[in-house]
Structures are given as C-alpha cells and as structure tokens.
Image: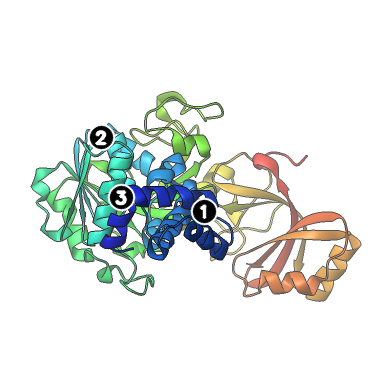
C-alpha cells in the first residue's frame, strides 16, 4: 500500500472495486483477481482492493464488524491491539479521569479508536505517512473523526503538555524486514524516551513485548500481562496514579459480543458479574473501569517463590499471563499447591479447585520418560488421541506423537516435564472448570 493506491481506493471506482473484492475474497487469489478484471477493474486497483478485502476478513477476529470498513496493512494488523484488550484499557483510562490522550505511534488506530469510543479526545502521532492516512480514514469510517485526529510526525516531538495522559506503543519490528526487536533500547521511539514519559505526564501507559525482561521495568510502574482465551497477547506498563500493584496478570475470555460491545456498555448474556466491591474473581481487586466481560486479575509483587513438593493428584498449567507476570507463587497460594521442580511452572495439588488462571488435569500415571514404556502403557489403555503439554522438556511433541504409533478409541493428556531434575511424563485427563472429574 502506498498513498497513490490508498487514494485510488477512496474514489468511487475504488469503492466499487472494494465491494467486488469483498465478494470474492477468501478463495483462490488467481480466481478472485480474474473475477475483478472481468468486471473491468484495472489490475493495480484490483490487487489493492483484493489485499484490503483479505485483510478485512482476517481483521474481524481482532476488531469485530468494524473491520469491514477499515483500511489496513499487513504489519499494522499483526501489531494492532485486539479490541477486547483495547476497550478494557480505554475503560480504565476513562475511569481514572483521563479526558485527553496522546497516542504516540498510533499505527492503524486500534487503541486510539477504543479510547475515543470511551469518550476520550485522542491526538494520534504516526511517523509513517501511509499508516497515518489509514488511521485517519479508520476514524472517519467508524464515526469517530471528531474525537481522534492524526498527525504524521515524530512522536518524540509532540507537546505532551497538551494532554493529561499518554499511550505509547513503540515499534518493535524493523522497518522493511518486519523482524521482531527484542532489545527495548532499539524500540522506536527509544526506550529512554518511553520510560521518561511518566516524569512528564503522570498518567502513562506503554505497550511492550510480553517477553520483556523484568529488570527493564521501572520500579514505580505496574506491569500487566494480558491473555485472551489462553493466548498471551501483550504486556503494558502503567505509570503514575494508574500503577496500582507491582505485577498484574489479566485473563480475558472474549467472544463476538465482547468485541462488539463498547466500553461501559450493558453486559450480554453469559457475562461474568464483577462481584462485590468490583472484585473480579472473588478475591482479587478489579482495576478501575474494568469492563463487565469475563475478566480476572491476579496480582502480587512478582518476586515470591512457590514452595516445592511431590507430584500430587492434580496438575495446574498456569495461564501464560500468570507465568510471565511471575505470579505462579500467588496462584499456588490460592490453590494450596506446590511445584515439583523449582524451575518449572506446573503446580500440583491434592484437590481440584475452580480457577480462571490455569487448566487442571487429573494425573493417573507418573513415570520416568521412556518411549518404550509410554507406548506400552498407552497401547494397554487403548489410547488413540493425545494432547501433549510440555515445560522443561526438549522433546518435540510432533515427533513424539509419530513415535507413539497410537491406535485406540480413548483420549489422554501427556505432560512432558521434569520432576526434581529428572525427565518425566505424566499421563492425565482434563478436569472441567477445575472441578472434580466427571
């Protein structure tokens, strides 16, 4: 996508090409291109329209129905925040009294649009001219151009005294190659600028890679890791009055209704109530402005070590947000559980308890890893289908599945791990909702 292609898509002819492309996207690209050319659409315009139609189709999972009218790029879509996460962040900012926000490095505008929907006036800054133009068009497409405006420029030059809060999502991919950047000092804007924002604007939020080294997190910031339906999707640093606890793991359960409902909108059937005094899971505090969706938080300092004990009847596989936030010990405390190896984040307990922060398996066999013994055991149990989990094992689940040569009608769960340093395989079965097995 370049500015000329974008301008062409904004014409009446371009709109017609987009409508035609939407009807044929998702199938064979050569057939789709031929269909547009047969309607007289020029080759260049047809290619641009088909690319947009395909990106919009993929974007529904992130943005919901609004994706149908948005303008996107492949890198921008990959890096954009999911709507359920952006809406929750916007609600938290609005509840904290934020009325004007600078989005430094706004990309395609996913976070800015969420903030605008929450009633916040957003000033976006984007260095790439094409991306800036697309973000402005997206604001227009969803009817928020009066609350979200975009300027193309250097985020470090924006006058932050104009706003009462800043959101910054520094670029973590190299321009041209798209390769991920793991060193925060190589972010754009650079890390020293990003971490210095809190001293200039009290209300700050910085989106960072989930794998960020805890040593790089400012001591006075709240670091939050967020998962959606079990997938770790982002981390964010909250500064100033927004920092409530040192570490927070947020587990979201999203669905189509969650993606479509605006912040603060009425709950839909099946939404989990927030409970007394805003508690989201019965014992953890909700963040201000938390949405009425299925949202759960586990909080702590991030520097507590869990106890170590033997393998017990039930295994908990913590949600990746809990693991990355270094809150496994806090989860262990709620489950009366221990580790079997101090370096591996599997928890073991004598009794199952419902928890939104991890999966529970009932362990029926524990044996030192031996392919021959495991194959014989599964053959005896007539196991033909297995899910394979692993932590602390170098084995390839795909290769192990082939080597087992499974045959039978029964399912099983295999956990490849270490116990007291020794390679071990656990054979189990899932426990629904953390309760007793059926």
Residue for point 42% across, 45% down:
67
Q: Residue at x 15, y 61 (%)?
A: 154
Q: Are marks 2 and 3 in contact (CB under 8 Å)?
A: no
Label 2 – label 3 distance at C-alpha: 41 Å
Q: Quadrant of residue 417?
A: bottom right
Label 1 CA crowd tier, 10 Å (few <14, some 14–19, many 20+): few
Q: Which mark is residue 11?
A: 3
Residue located beneath label 1 in the image: 231
Residue 384: x, y in percent?
A: 83, 60
Q: Where is 194 relative to 70, above or below? A: below
Decide which of 320, 62 is in the foreground and name it. 62
Task: Give the quarter of the figure containing the N terminus.
Answer: bottom left
Q: Judge depth for marks 3 and 1 and give the one in front.
A: 3
- Residue lying at the far right of the rendered structure: 380
Marks 2 & 1, CB-CB < 8 Å contact: no
Tell which circle, 3 or 1, labels the residue nearer the N-terminal end. 3
Q: Is residue 42 visible?
A: yes
Query: Rounded to the nearest whole Å, what is the CA distance between mark 2 and mark 1?
Result: 27 Å
Q: Of discs 2 and 3, which sits in the foreground?
A: 3
Quick one: SS at disc 1? strand
**Residue 326, can we see it?**
no
Q: Which residue is mark 2?
A: 96
Asked if 217 appears above or below 162 in the picture, the reply is below
- The tally of labels here is 3
């Amino acid at each position: 996508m370049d500015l000329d292609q974008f301008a062409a898509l904004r014409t009446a002819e371009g709109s017609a090409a987009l409508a035609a492309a939407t009807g044929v996207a998702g199938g064979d690209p050569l057939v789709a291109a031929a269909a547009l050319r047969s309607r007289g659409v020029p080759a260049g315009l047809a290619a641009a329209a088909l690319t947009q139609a395909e990106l919009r189709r993929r974007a529904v999972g992130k943005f919901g129905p609004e994706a149908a009218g948005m303008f996107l790029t492949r890198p921008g879509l990959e890096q954009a925040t999911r709507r359920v996460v952006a809406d929750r962040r916007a609600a938290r900012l609005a509840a904290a009294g934020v009325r004007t926000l600078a989005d430094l490095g706004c990309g395609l505008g996913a976070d800015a649009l969420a903030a605008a929907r929450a009633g916040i006036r957003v000033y976006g800054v984007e260095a790439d001219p094409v991306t800036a133009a697309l973000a402005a068009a997206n604001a227009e497409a969803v009817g928020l151009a009066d609350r979200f405006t975009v300027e193309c420029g250097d985020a470090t030059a924006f006058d932050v005294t104009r706003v009462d809060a800043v959101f910054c999502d520094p670029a973590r991919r190299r321009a041209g190659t798209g390769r991920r950047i793991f060193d925060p000092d190589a972010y754009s804007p650079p890390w020293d600028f990003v971490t210095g924002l809190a001293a200039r604007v009290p209300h700050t939020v910085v989106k960072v890679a989930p794998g960020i080294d805890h040593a790089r997190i400012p001591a006075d910031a709240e670091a939050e890791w967020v998962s959606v339906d079990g997938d770790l999707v982002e981390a964010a640093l909250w500064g100033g009055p927004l920092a409530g606890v040192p570490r927070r793991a947020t587990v979201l359960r999203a669905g189509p209704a969650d993606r479509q409902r605006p912040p603060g909108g009425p709950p839909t059937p099946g939404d989990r109530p927030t409970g007394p005094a805003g508690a989201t899971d019965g014992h953890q505090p909700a963040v201000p402005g938390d949405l009425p969706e299925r949202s759960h938080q586990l909080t702590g300092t991030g520097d507590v070590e869990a106890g170590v004990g033997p393998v017990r009847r039930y295994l908990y596989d913590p949600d990746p947000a809990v693991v990355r936030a270094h809150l496994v010990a806090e989860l262990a405390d709620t489950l009366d559980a221990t580790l079997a190896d101090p370096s591996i984040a599997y928890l073991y307990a004598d009794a199952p308890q419902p928890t939104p922060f991890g999966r529970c398996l009932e362990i029926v066999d524990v044996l030192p890893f031996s392919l021959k013994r495991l194959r014989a055991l599964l053959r005896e149990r007539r196991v033909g289908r297995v899910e394979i989990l692993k932590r602390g094992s170098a084995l390839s689940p795909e290769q192990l599945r082939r080597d087992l040569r499974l045959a039978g009608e029964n399912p099983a769960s295999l956990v490849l791990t270490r116990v007291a340093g020794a390679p071990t395989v656990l054979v189990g079965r899932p426990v629904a909702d953390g309760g007793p097995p059926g």
